[in-house]
């Protein structure tokens, strides 16, 4: 049905443009043709307006406003590409093989005005579509937006770039619509309505509130399926002990304010180490039902030991000062770069693992991921991957698969072909739809399993 609508829209627009090109030059010569031209313009104007407002010939309100705009933008670009090619071929063939019978200045001006109008109409189609997709698409990212701008000035290459933009945005709109309809279908099931609320704990060097959404589209997907979500909000860079104390207090505050008794912790990267410390050393165990660590270096990072040994202390302190100064502006009260990094080394984690005892009343499980090559991750993970692989083996760009294993159950995330799954992909850091891995659906299933366990 959607392909029929697109074809019908293209035929309407093509017929309108063709009539405009043929009628306008001759409309100056007879009253009948003038009337036909005015009628064609009147009908064509409203058809053109309707196509720009609703290119898919439907007022479907599913999948949210942003996705509807994205879908309409992709459809407009498809119409622009199809009609531009068709009109170019039509004008060339018409000029070469059809006897017009017209001559003189008036005829030439009419033909020129006709061509200008066609160009203007196509320009409206293009800019309407490109503004829609540029302002609403997530998957285009900075990369394809820049490619589109640069290649737009290069003949033939711009057609390739436009085709790629259309493909990316069309697939994104279709995927998001399927996700929306899936959540609508299972809304009453409330798959993620666990007995205890979720506490999402961020990793090192980031915050999970105010200026940055650390967890991407994951919290929204969980809430749509019935979850109650809270955030750790600990310092972005501090020692495991200090962050553990903050988390323990945060957990007590949530329990006191809501009366929920316990929380289910889902912690990413260093947040998993902070959470373990809060449970085992800071008295939070009675208020924690489960701990799921995601891409957490439980056995540390050997490459971190190597770097700290090789990088001069003066350089380390310089980096720390700049980082600490920047993060104070983003909400950290007392960030400490040099306290956070050493706690991620293999030697520090080995000592901590000997000291901390897991609580028997808490359900522990872990998730890790693996990149398949350096190009699988975005900067700086693509740069770190070879170094981590040299020292730690298979990894996600920062944490080795072996180091991520912890608890009663371990899940490895990757793709058999293509890029694999990076450290950032496991929290939807780049909001990227990865073929073979739906990060939002993974978290919905993960929380659903917690619900099934009575947690």
Image (cartoon, grey):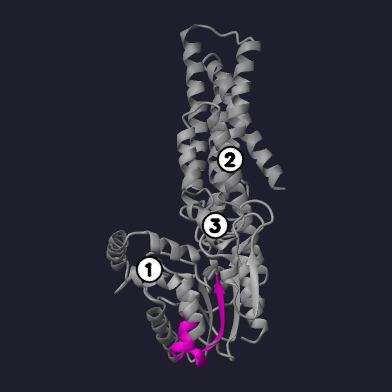
- Camera-near label (3 vs 1) is 3
Could you say whether the residue bearing mark 3 is in a helix, strand or loop? helix
Could you say whether the residue bearing mark 1 is in a helix, strand or loop? loop
> Which residue is found at the position 51% from the left and 32% from the top?
121
Mark 2 touches mark 1? (CB < 8 Å): no
Badge number at residue 334: none
Residue hosting label 3: 390
Mark 3 touches mark 2? (CB < 8 Å): no
Residue 196's spot in the image, x, y percent? 56, 86
> Which residue is found at the position 64% from the left and 36% from the top?
10
Q: Is residue 178 left or right of residue 126?
A: right
Between 78 and 194, which is closer to the camera in this rendering? 194
Between 196 and 274, which is closer to the camera in this rendering? 274
Residue 152's spot in the image, x, y percent? 48, 33
Mark 1 burial class by Cα count in 10 Å: few <14, some 14-19, many 20+: few
Residue 193 in sight here: no
Q: Earlier in the sequence, mark 3 or mark 1?
A: 1
Between 367 and 384, which is closer to the camera in this rendering? 384
Chain part drawn in magenta: 275-294
- Residue 44 higher or lower than 393, as above or below: above
Cα distance in 3D space between marks 2 and 1: 34 Å
Q: Earlier in the sequence, mark 3 or mark 2?
A: 2
Badge number at residue 210: 1
- Residue 333 higher or lower than 321, as above or below: below
96 in the magenta segment? no
> Which residue is found at the position 58% from the left and 40% from the top?
164
Cα distance in 3D space between marks 3 and 1: 37 Å
Badge number at residue 164: 2
Residue 388's spot in the image, x, y percent? 52, 59
């Amino acid at each position: 049905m959607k392909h029929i609508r697109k074809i019908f829209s293209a035929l309407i627009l093509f017929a309108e443009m063709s009539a405009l090109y043929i009628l306008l030059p001759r409309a100056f010569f007879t009253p009948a043709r003038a009337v036909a031209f005015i009628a064609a313009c009147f009908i064509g104007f409203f058809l053109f307006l309707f196509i720009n407002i609703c290119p898919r010939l439907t007022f479907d309100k599913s999948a949210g406003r942003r996705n509807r705009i994205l879908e309409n933008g992709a459809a407009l670009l498809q119409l622009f590409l199809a009609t531009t090619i068709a009109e170019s071929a039509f004008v060339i063939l018409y000029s070469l093989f059809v006897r017009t019978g017209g001559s003189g200045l008036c005829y030439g001006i009419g033909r020129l005005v006709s061509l200008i109008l066609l160009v203007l109409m196509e320009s409206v189609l293009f800019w309407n579509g490109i503004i829609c997709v540029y302002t609403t698409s997530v998957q285009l990212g900075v990369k394809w937006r820049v490619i589109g701008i640069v290649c737009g000035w290069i003949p033939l290459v711009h057609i390739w770039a436009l085709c790629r933009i259309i493909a990316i945005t069309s697939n994104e709109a279709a995927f998001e619509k399927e996700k929306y309809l899936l959540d609508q279908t299972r809304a009453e099931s409330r798959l993620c309505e666990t007995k205890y609320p979720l506490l999402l704990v961020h990793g090192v060097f980031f915050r999970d509130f105010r200026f940055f959404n650390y967890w991407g589209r994951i919290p929204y997907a969980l809430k749509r399926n019935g979850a109650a979500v809270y955030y750790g909000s600990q310092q972005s860079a501090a020692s495991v002990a200090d962050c553990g104390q903050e988390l323990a207090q945060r957990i007590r505050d949530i329990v006191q304010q809501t009366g929920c008794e316990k929380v289910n912790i889902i912690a990413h990267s260093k947040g998993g180490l902070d959470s373990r410390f809060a449970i085992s050393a800071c008295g939070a165990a009675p208020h924690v039902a489960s701990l799921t660590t995601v891409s957490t270096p439980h056995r540390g990072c050997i490459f971190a030991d190597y770097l700290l040994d090789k990088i001069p202390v003066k350089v380390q302190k310089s980096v720390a000062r700049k980082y600490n100064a920047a993060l104070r502006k983003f909400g950290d009260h007392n960030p400490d770069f040099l306290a956070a990094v050493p706690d991620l080394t293999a030697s520090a984690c080995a000592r901590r693992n000997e000291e901390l005892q897991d609580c028997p009343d808490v359900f522990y499980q872990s998730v890790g991921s693996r990149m398949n090559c350096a190009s699988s991750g975005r900067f700086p993970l693509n740069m770190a991957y070879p170094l981590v692989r040299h020292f730690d083996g298979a990894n996600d760009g920062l944490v080795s698969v072996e180091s991520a294993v912890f608890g009663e159950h371990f899940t490895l995330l990757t793709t058999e072909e293509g890029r694999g799954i990076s450290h950032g992909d496991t929290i939807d850091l780049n909001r990227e739809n990865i073929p073979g891995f739906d990060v939002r659906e993974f978290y919905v299933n993960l929380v659903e399993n917690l619900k099934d366990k009575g947690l």
